Amino acid sequence: MLSDQELLRYSRQILLAQVDIDGQLRLKNSRALIVGLGGLGSPVALYLAAAGVGELHLADFDTVDVTNLQRQVLHDSASVGLSKVDSAIARLTAINPEITLRAHRTALDEDSLATVVKAVDLVLDCSDNFATREAVNAACVAQGKPLVSGAAIRLEGQLSVFDPRLAHSPCYHCLYGHGSEAELTCSEAGVLGPLVGLVGSLQALEALKLLAGFGEPLVGRLLLIDALGSRFRELRVKRDPGCSVCGGQHD
């Protein structure tokens, strides 16, 4: 049940017919893994904590650097030098002490990633490198857990949802294959803060829809964001039956 304090805290979203008491209870009983607590993970963590997702697993092996503060709004100047997970826990606890926070301060290898993905209902990939995205996708496919994937660099962003529970859903590998050898990071190519805030906020929105059970998630669709021209474009993405990651899942 929801306590009187929780009914008050979440009253504005409970007022939504799509959420209501039942949806809020589903959020309270949900567990989500956030991989990466940087530019994308910051709004994701802030909004999921504020919305009352009952248990958040926070995964990041990095420490806060002064160059992060331009876009990673989960952290502040006093956090420089601290573990991003510890910085996040302090901020999220201050926002919502009603939820449970689980810390993962070291890089997740194949075994630990499988364990934590199995323990949650949904995964949000907020990482900044292809190898991590591939590993997270493979774990989600193996465990049958939905994955909300976002990316942003320079002035361009992308967002999609991959749900291996659905026979028609592609996985991350269906879309991106083996990636690009010329993969760049934000430290090399640059990125604008509000863009990662926008993509991360949309990731949080997709996660809340999936966890509370309302709306139409972005499954089988890739949202492309052009921040320079303030334009959004949507592409349809089909599952690849020959995909080396998810190809045999629904045979």
Image (cartoon, rainbow, N blue to C red):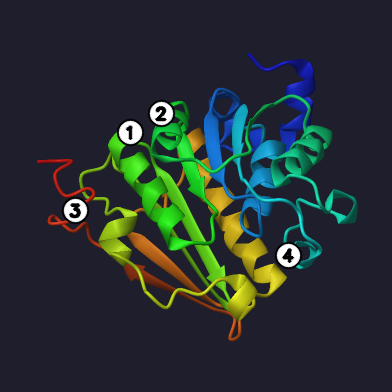
- Image position of 236 (left or right of 111): left
Q: Distance between the residues labelled 4 and 2?
A: 31 Å
Q: Which of 232 and 141 is in front in this view?
A: 141
Q: Quadrant of residue 172?
A: bottom left
- Residue 199 at least partly seen: yes
Q: Which amino acid does label 3 sit on?
A: Ser
Q: Distance between the residues labelled 2 and 3?
A: 21 Å
First in residue order: circle 4 vs circle 3: 4
Q: Position of residue 149 (x, y in %)?
A: 46, 55
Residue occupying image coordinates x 49% and y 40%: 108
| Disc 1 to disc 3: CB gap under 8 Å | no
Q: Residue furthest bottom?
A: 229
Location of residue 176 with respect to 108 vertically, above or below: below
- Mark 1–mark 4 distance (CA, rounded to whole Å): 32 Å
Q: Name the residue under label 2.
A: 118
Secondary element at image label 4? loop
**First-in-chain label (1 vs 4):** 4
Please tell me which of labels 1 and 3 falls first in the chain: 1
Q: Is residue 133 above or below residue 209?
A: below
Q: Return the residue at label 3.
A: 244
- Location of the C terminus (image quadrant): top left
Residue topped by disc 4: 71
Q: Badges 1 and 2: C-beta atoms under 8 Å apart? A: yes
**Residue 21 drawn at (x, y percent):** 60, 25
Q: How far apart are marks 1 and 3 (CA)?
A: 16 Å
Task: Give the amino acid at mark 2.
Answer: Lys
Q: Which of marks 1 and 3 is in front?
A: 3
Q: Do the residues labelled 2 and 3 touch (CB within 8 Å)?
A: no
Please rate how many residues cluster around mark 1, counting C-alpha atoms within 10 Å: few if below 14, some from 14 to 19, many from 20: some
> Which image quarter is the N terminus in?
top right
Tag 1: amino acid = Gln
